[in-house]
Every structure is written in C-alpha cells, then in structure tokens.
Image (cartoon, rainbow, N blue to C red):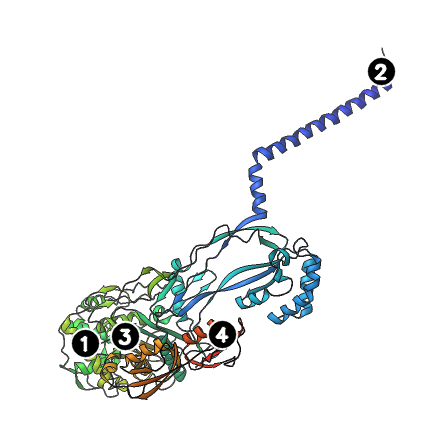
Amino acid sequence: MEKTDPKKQEKNDILWRVYLVYLFTVVFALLILGRVIHLQFIDGDRWREKARNETLRYINIDAVRGDILADDGRLLATSVPVYEIRIDLSRKVVSDEVLFAGIDSLALRLSRLFRDKSQSEYKRMILKARSEQDQFFLLRRNVNYHQLVELKTFPVLRLGRYRGGLRVIERSRRETPFKTLASRTIGYEREGVYVGLEGAYREFLEGTQGQRLMQRISGGWMPINDEDEIQPVNGKDVITTININIQDVAENALQKQLQRYNATHGTVVVMEVATGKVKAISNLTRNGAGNYEEVFNYAIGESAEPGSTFKLASLIALLEDGIVKPDEFVQTGNGRTLFADRLMRDAKDGGFGTITFSEVFALSSNVGFSTLVNKAYSRNPSRFISHLENLMIDKPLGIEIKGEGIPKVPRPGEAGWSGVTLPWLSIGYGVSLTPLQMLSLYNAIANDGKYMKPMFVEEVRQTGKLVKRFEPQVVKRAICSKPTLEKVKAMLELVVESGTASGINTQVYRIAGKTGTAQYTSSSGGYKSSERMIYRASFAGYFPADNPIYSMIVVIHDPKGWVYSGSQVAAPVFREIADKIYATQINVNENYLHGATMTMLPDVVAGSVDDLRRIYSIFNCRFRLAEKGAQWATARVSGQDTVQATSREFIHNLVPNVVGMGLSDALFLLENAGLRVRISGRGAVRSQSIRPGTRTVPGSEIVIQLS
C-alpha cells in the first residue's frame, strides 16, 4: 500500500484553506457589489430623497395677517413686524480681524440697547459661539423695527450678512392698539384656536403662506439664501361696524357701574336700527384682583332667562290676538296670585290694584301679564309659542362669530312642562336668550317691524381696494301687524315717561324701552325662594323714540347690595351712553345742529386751514383768514358766528410745536420733519418730549402725550 507523503498532504491542506478563504472573499465582494448596485440603481432615489429631507427642507413663511379696522378706518388689530436676530460666526464669514476688532464695542452697545445682559455676558456668549463655529447663533428674539435699525449700525453687524454674519428673520406679532376695547369680539389666536372676528373672517385675514428652503446645521436650521422660494401673499383687511367713540363711551359707562355695584360681569351692545350694524359691544368680567376685563363674550355666548324685558314678546302676542287693548283695565289685585302651587308676586308690596294694560306693561306687573297670558292661552299654549316663533325668539341669529348661545323655548308636551310653565314664561322665565338675541327683537320694533341680522363687518379690502362688501340682511320684513307695532311703540315710551324707567326720562330726546330684573340662585340657575338671590338687571330699548337711530341693551349680572333692579342698575347705563351718543353723533343730533344756534364755538390751537374751513362751515360760521395761501392756522372765536384765523408757519429743520393739535395733523408735521413718533393716550396733543424750535435730527424719537 502506497504511503501519502506528509509534506505533500500538508501542502494540499494549506491550498484548500487558501482556496476556501479566496472563495469566501470573492462571494463577500460579490455581495457587497450587489448591494452597492441595488442601493445605487434600485433604492438610490429613495435614499437620496431621505438624505435631502434630513439636511434640506422647506418651511412655511407666514403671510402678514390683514388688519381689523373700525368703521372709520382706525386700527383695532394689526400685525406688527418683529425680528429674530442671528449671527453666522463661522470664520469663513466673519474673520478674526473683524470680530476681535469690534467685539468689545459690539457687546457694549448690545447691552445698552436691550438692557438684559452686561457687556461681559454678551462678549462671552459671542466668543463661545465663535469657538463652536456656530453658523446660526441666536442673538435675540422679538426685536422691534427701531431696535433693528439701530442694531445695523453696530460694529461687526454693520458689515452685513457676508462679512458681519448678520441674519434677520422677520416675523409678525398681533397687536390691538385700543387694548381692551371690544377685545373679545375682535378676538385673538391661542394655540391655533381663533375666536371672535379673527376666527370668523380668518379666510380673508390669513393670506397665503410662502415657503423658504432651509439647510440643517449644528444648532438648528438656516436659510440657504435670502430669497423666498415662494413669496407669501398678505392677508386682506376687514372693516368692521365698530365705532371707536361709541365703543369707548359704552365700555367706560359699563365699567363704572360694574365697579359701583361690585357686579360679577356685564355687557352692553349698541346697534344701528336701520342696518343691524353693531356699533359697540362690551363684555366685562371681574377678575380675582377686583378689576374688570374682557374674558368672555356674554352678549353673544351667554344664554339666560331675560326676565321682564321678555314681556315685550308677551305684549305683542296679546295685542296681535286682540286679547286686551292698551287702555283696557286689568285687575292685578294685591300683587299676589297662585298658579297651581306656585305664588306669583309683583315687585310692589300690596300690588297695583286695577290699572290699564299700558300701565301693566309700564309698571312691569308680573301678576297682570301672567294672568292675561294664562287665561288666553292655557287651553292652547301652542298658540302662544307660535307667536314667539314668529318673533324669531326660538332661532339663533346665525352670526359669523362662533359660540352663539342657543335660544331655549319650552313647548307643550316636553319634559318639564307644567301648569306653571306658561305664566312664568310670559314674564321671561323658563326661556333662555342671549343679550344680542333679545336686542334684535327690540331693534325690530324700532325698525318698523323689520327684523335685521346683526352685522359686525362691512367690507373686506386689500391694499385699499374693495374685495367684498357685506350688505345689511333682512331676516323678516314684519314681525307683527302695523296697528300692533304702533301700540307697542307707545307703550315702550310710556315705560320711560312714567313707568319703571322714569328715572332716565329726558326732555332733550325721547327714549323707549323696558326694564328687566331676573332672579337666580348659583346652584340651580333658576328662581328659588331659599338661598341667596342673584339678580340680573337689564334694560333694552332704542332712541330717539320718534326717529330711532340706535337700539341698545345693558345687562349687569349679580350687582351686590340692596340696589339690584334693572331700573336702578342697568337703565342709568343706557341713559349715560345714549346721552353721549346723542350729543356727539351729528347724524343723530341733526335737528339740533340745523335748528339752533351754538352758544360757544370751539377754538383751535393749530390745524389745517382746509379742515378748519370745512368744520366751521358745518356750524354756518364765517371763517376769516387774511393771509392767502396759508396751509396751517390758529382759529379763535370772535363772535357768535364768526371765526378769526391767523396763519401759523412751521420752519424747516426745526421741531414744530404740535401742542393742541389733533393727532393726524401732529403726525403729519412731525413725520415730515423726519422724526419717529411715539404716542401715548388719546385726544389732542397735550405735550411733546422735544422742545419746539429745537433743530431736528432725522430719525430721533419724539413722544407726544395726548389728552
């Protein structure tokens, strides 16, 4: 038998091992090659897209939100630009020579501008970012325009983006120049939720977002270039029906009364009778500190039992069906009567006895109304409910602002209907309405029976051009017959002349309306004889009664103390607001302007000659100005119907004297002089921070205090 050579055997073993390793190497290489080919040609597009998404992305650029304006064009809400300041501190942009030559001065000026950190803190922050080669170092957020202008003059940053590394990202912040005025109705955005007009007209206000290409760097995302890939389209402006002057008067009168009676909350709405335009709406709530602020829109969102203001609906039903006439006598007895097991009372101890139906309404007799309604409709209560439906009481107004309270009207056959439902319903219990829904009914009476949908917005504009106009909407052309309407108007006037609201009667103009005092308990929300009573005082009406221009409702919830009725708490607010509107609104006070001579004409410290001529001409005054071609003048009264004007000159390069001027004239002069104007207050100019006659320094800030 042949022996195997050990050396040869060993050699073969080594060769097999080499071949095996070689084979594995080849197979492994082929697998790698196959994977590379698969990644490159099959999955390549997917991985390349993923890489791009991780290093590049488009971000949305918000459009500038449109303004919300009052009926005269004054701003109620606007977007103010604010800026985020970042610096590219990489050496390829900012050289060592530039940075270290200016860093001390830069840190000092940043500290003086923002007053939040010391010079050394700013210097340390910048040097740390430099050591990390931060290409997108955040210097400061929420920088305003004037700060930005100053910032661009600082060492290093004044060299711009490519040598100083300055990067400015513009954003916007929503501001309300008149602060709390109608703030809940104007609305706001919180965490993506829009309320008020901001939400109702969001589609117009928002505009269209743009897009910008961003690249990931250490510490965040940085724009690849300053040019937006897709430019945003700014939002449109919304012109509301709100009148700033009426709104201011309404809010001040309401707040004063709420404070006087330490009430929980209150609301006032003023509406233009013919159109349904809401000219003022104020909703104030007492906070923990005892101050009043707008946190909820009670006028629109709070549905509650209205009390005696609801008697207007019962009045119309009784007159329409011919149940009783205004001069017909009604027995109210001693002011107490039973319905099933529940006692109905009048506010007056001992009752009113036998009085006419007009007096039942004017004196707000609960017994009189409930007795008449129960007698007329107890066998067929659906007949009474159909009258309420005809008056639109069971339907929401359908306004654009979200959150409208749903009206509640009980119906026969429903759970809870009993022998006491109808009599208590007749005086405003068991039914729920919002103040705006209640006002709409009174407005319809003032508008000769025509029921208008309340409107808050007149127009939508973009860069001054009309985009859309909203016309007044007639919901129902007649809520009752003409004979009934005339009787109702007369009875509403009687309430103020000799009834529960006689305390607000005035000889200057006539008011029509109705008081209301509803009772609640905190536990049930309805009336109970036990527990502490919570009262809801209200007054709804319109003026001037013989030619109605405005309707109004005032509601004050939970006034403290012994005074709580609508006649004592709510009606005086109505009168105060109505007085001021009547005295200041020319379209309301037209008869006075044209039919009487003004005993004292106003002097004007300084104003545009053209404006002065136009204003004094309204009062049929002779306007005398000796100097021809004068642009500005001082006007002094020299007689009952004569105004003597003296030209007033303003010297170029000198700060003008604007004390006594209106805001628009003052702004025109100061801004033309190159000054940046900061305003405080409202009214005419009371003082200015830079002395008149001082040489102007373009770009300087001047503060004007208004009266």
Q: Amino acid at mark 3?
A: Ser
In percent of width and height, residue 19 lies at 75, 23
Q: Nearer the viewer, residue 614 or 183?
A: 614
Q: How many angstroms separate mark 1 from mark 3 (CA)?
A: 15 Å
- Labels 2, 3: front one: 3
In percent of width and height, residue 653 lies at 50, 75
Residue 24 vs 175, above or below: the answer is above
Ranked by sequence position, the earlier of labels 1 and 2 is 2
* Residue identifier under label 1: 488
Q: Are marks 1 and 2 in contact (CB under 8 Å)?
A: no
Q: Amino acid at mark 2?
A: Thr
Secondary element at tag 4:
strand
The numbered disc on residue 678 is 4
Q: Amino acid at mark 4?
A: Arg
Q: Quick check: can you spot residue 308?
A: yes
Ranked by sequence position, the earlier of labels 4 and 2 is 2
Secondary element at tag 1:
helix
Q: Is residue 239 left or right of residue 48?
A: left
* Residue identifier under label 3: 551
Q: Nearer the viewer, residue 18 or 626?
A: 626
Ranked by sequence position, the earlier of labels 1 and 3 is 1
Q: Is residue 664 left or right of residue 565?
A: right
- Labels 3, 4: front one: 4
Q: Are marks 3 and 4 in contact (CB under 8 Å)?
A: no
Give the residue displayed 17% in from the left and 73% down from the top.
Answer: 485
Residue 216 vs 505, above or below: the answer is above
